[in-house]
Amino acid sequence: MNSILVTGGAGFIGSNFVRMILSEHADCLVVNLDSLTYAGNLGNLEGFMDHPQHKFVKGDICDGAGVEKLIDEYKIDSIINFAAESHVDRSLVDPGIFIETNVKGTLALLKAALDKGIGRFLQVSTDEVYGSLGSEGMFTEDTPLSPNSPYSASKAGADHLVKAFGHSWGLEYNITRCSNNYGPYQFPEKMIPLMINNALADKELPVYGDGLYVRDWLYVYDHCTAIWKVLTEGKPGEIYNVGGNNEKTNLEVIGLILERLGKDSSLITYVKDRPGHDRRYAIDSSKMMSELGWAPTVTFEEGIVRTIDWYLENAKWLETIVSGEYEKYYDSMYSGR
Ligand code: NAD
Ligand code: TYD
């Protein structure tokens, strides 16, 4: 049986990945290390916490000795690092924690992986490390890194460290760089669930700037299958871009949400723009497709309906998430904007 250490498996993408593995791959033990920050929630793993192939451990990726202990205890053969501070807006308010978790945390995992002779280290990265595009072109794996926000700078720093451990000491690694994900269990600080949550409550939908910023959206399940493909079939030392080939402006996405929920566009409110806001992301995933035979399976039109319906059917999950701390966060970010 393969034994995988998944970090950040109580967050949005990590929990979707853990669910996929436990549902589809009977030959894997998943050790799920998560410190349960505001973004980590055991409710995301409901129904899977007691699964015989799943061991949840509350802990910090910065604790190298703790990670080494887990590697020994569960005879870990690969590590997938999802754990991160992941929200650009928060990084513009408090960048320090992004360096702690995303850079120093990755470094601690890399040291542990090297000391313990881990067979494969997969770093879950983002297309945001490439910076911003104009109206033409796409990011390829050869695009130079040019991050613009403290979040993307910290992720780029981590990517460089992963490559350096491979180059200097032969650590077998892969890096995946994916575009914007959406789907079930996404924390409503990110655009799609935030707009769904606000529209459901007939609250204003805060659109940054002119709303014509472009993102390439990928349904989270398709990101998870890409990560599995790279882990099991990727060539060591290779970087793979992952995207949906599905560019939309923020206003187009918000329009679909309003339509599905039967709400009026008068909810749209233009607010002060994010500082240094990247205009456009678009990712070329042809390497994933031609070398690993991966392709997205969910169209945006299908995925957005599935996502909205999931939030409608999981009102209790959403209610728990948006109570308490979230309210304070929302007020501090959006009041007076
Ligand atoms: P998320 O914020 O929903 O989840 C992050 C998880 O990491 C949480 O469960 C949190 O508790 C955990 N965590 C944070 N600090 C930790 C620490 N020090 N030790 C252990 N656990 C810790 O993030 P997400 O959207 O699921 O993103 C997961 C990964 O995918 C991140 O590395 C992110 O950079 C990358 N990514 C995200 C997107 C996207 O659209 N969301 C796109 C591309 C890549
Ligand atoms: P986000 O979900 O934060 O992802 P990222 O910044 O990592 O791409 O934002 C997606 C897009 O939506 C981005 O262009 C910023 C915009 N946005 C808004 O217009 N209003 C909001 O309240 C948020 C959170 C995002």
Image (cartoon, rainbow, N blue to C red):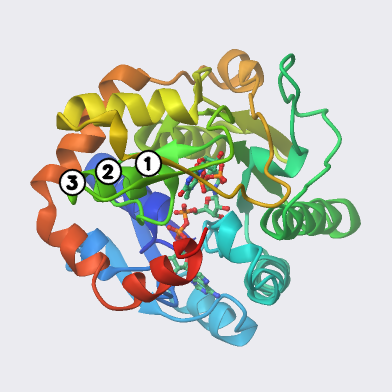
Q: Is residue 8 visible?
A: yes
Residue 192 numbered tag: 1
Read off the residue under disc 2: 196
In percent of width and height, residue 223 lies at 45, 35
Residue type at mark 3 is: Leu
Find the distance from the CA under tag 3 to the CA under tag 1: 12 Å
Find the distance from the CA under tag 3 to the CA under tag 2: 6 Å
Q: Nearer the viewer, residue 203 or 89?
A: 203
Q: Identify which residue is drawn at 46% across, 18% down.
A: 295
Q: How many marks?
A: 3
Q: Nearer the viewer, residue 222 or 324?
A: 324
Pointer 1 and pointer 2: residues touching (CB < 8 Å)? yes
Residue type at mark 2 is: Ile
Pointer 3 and pointer 2: residues touching (CB < 8 Å)? yes
Residue type at mark 1 is: Ile
Find the distance from the CA under tag 1 to the CA under tag 2: 6 Å
Residue 162 numbered tag: none
Q: Is residue 7 visible?
A: no
In percent of width and height, residue 292 lies at 56, 22
CB at disc 1 and ligand 2 closer than 8 Å: yes
In this rendering, is residue 119 above or below 62? above
> Which mark lies nearer to you, 3 or 1?
3
